[in-house]
Image: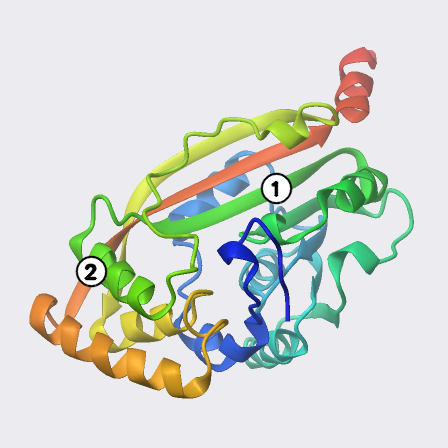
Amino acid sequence: MITKTNIDEGHAFDWGKTSPDYAVYRPGYPASFYTVLQAVGIGKPGQHILDLGTGTGVLARAFAKQGAYVIGIDIAAEQIAAAQQLAAQEHLDVRFMTCAAEDAAYPAQSFDIISCGQSWLYFDQQRMIPLVKTWLKPGGKLVLTYLSWLPRKDPIAQASEQLILRYNPHWSDADFPGSRTIQHAWSRQDFRLVTYHAYEEGIPFTRDSWRGRIRACRGIGASLVPEEVARFDQEHDGLLRQIAPETFTVLHQVWLHAYTPIEHADAVQASPS
């Protein structure tokens, strides 16, 4: 179980509880996103990549498909088991480990890229920042990626959120307006922003797959007991039958921040051409 005072009013959650739904229904990033990453030099063949908070290995498996050497770590053993199974099904060679990111140990300058898909907020930044700076090779990048539905623009997302809040009023991810943060305040002392990129895209779902996606969110599957999840899901099914066709898209924002340690950036600028 994880608790953080700035998340869900300090109420506990456990991503491992969501693993069966997470592995099937979390859609991952659209193909367009990997085109963006490739354009800024992230996920290239031969790169050594560490994926923090890997979950079921969404990013790790995508990077491995592109020819990178990837390690994925996550604190939830159930998530790692699901990631290993999915990688095996896809015949991918990814090294997955159950480990808190703050407790991981790697030699200095081991990685070209350290990626983090929607999980940086769960880490102890005071511990992680020195580790990331140590583990990155010169010119390496810390890449934070996100995929979030937009309830202010999408009525199905908005209706589902309202139901989530009825069952879990402590859930703190509701009413996301879209990212307005170009560079995170915590990064300014240690990192330079390489790129910030954000755009919107409709992600396709069926009523069943959207139900699964919502069950796999922190506010439901990771927080509620199974009986509450079942009651929520039954009510959500009825709601979707009223407001949604069998197939539809939900508008999401996809965005990323890529950082490089300041001393790395200074060294690159100072090097002779």
Crowdedness of circle 1 by 10 Å Cα count: few (<14), some, many (20+)? many
Give the camera-side residue of 18 and 42. Answer: 18
Give the camera-side residue of 159 and 23. Answer: 159
- The residue to which callout 1 is attached is 143
Crowdedness of circle 2 by 10 Å Cα count: few (<14), some, many (20+)? some
- Classify 89 as above or below 173: below
Spot occupied by residue 202 in the image (x, y as percentages of width and height): 26, 51
- Disc 1 to disc 2: CB gap under 8 Å: no
- Classify 95 as above or below 153: below
Quadrant of residue 179 within the rendered picture: top left
Spot occupied by residue 231 in the image (x, y as percentages of width and height): 30, 84
Of labels 1 and 2, earlier in sequence is 1
Q: Residue at x 59, y 81 (%)?
A: 85
Amino acid type shown at disc 2: Ala
Spot occupied by residue 181 in the image (x, y as percentages of width and height): 47, 30
Q: Residue at x 64, y 71 (%)?
A: 1
- Classify 242 as above or below 188: below
Quadrant of residue 100 within the rendered picture: bottom right
As helix, strand or loop, the secondary structure at mark 2 comes to helix
- The residue to which callout 2 is attached is 159
Spot occupied by residue 252 in the image (x, y as percentages of width and height): 32, 49
Asked whether residue 98 is in view, the answer is yes
Total numbered circles: 2
